[in-house]
Amino acid sequence: MRSTFPKVLINDIRSLPIPEIPIKQQQPLIVLADKILAAKKKDPKADTLALEKEIDEMVYELYGLTKEEIKIVEGKT
């Protein structure tokens, strides 16, 4: 069976705009990720949606996304 997903080439990945983030700015993301991992380790069915939403909002801010762009990312267009 053939995959319906488009091929992603290494040059496609290299052209992604990935911001460099100072360690101090990374720390809140790390703390939230650690909380999610700890909750899932304790209970794989744990509800971590609120923590995931916090991470999403931080990432949106890092990329300077507008409300309209966020809607597109979240599939709400």
Image (spheres, rainbow, N blue to C red):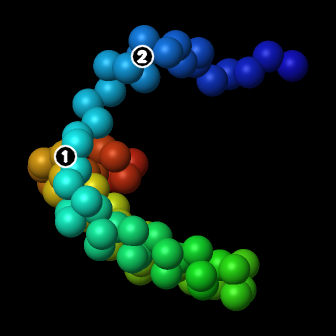
Instruction: Find the distance from the CA under tag 1 to the CA under tag 2.
Output: 18 Å
Quarter of the picture holding the N terminus: top right
x 71%, y 86%: residue:
43
Q: Which mark is residue 63?
A: 1
Which residue is more in the foreground, 16 or 50? 16
Q: Is residue 10 left or right of residue 73?
A: right
SS state under label 1: helix
Q: Amino acid at mark 1?
A: Tyr
Q: Are marks 1 and 2 in contact (CB under 8 Å)?
A: no
Q: Is residue 24 above or below residue 14?
A: below
Q: Is residue 46 positioned above or below 77 on the image?
A: below
x 69%, y 80%: residue: 41
Q: Position of residue 58 (x, y in %)?
A: 25, 63
53 vs 18, left or right, is right
Res 8 label: none
Q: In which quarter of the view is residue 2 placed?
A: top right
Q: How many marks?
A: 2
The amino acid sitting under disc 2 is Asp
- Marks 1 and 2, the one that precedes in the sequence: 2
Percent position of residue 46, x then y: 63, 84
- Residue ID for mark 2: 12
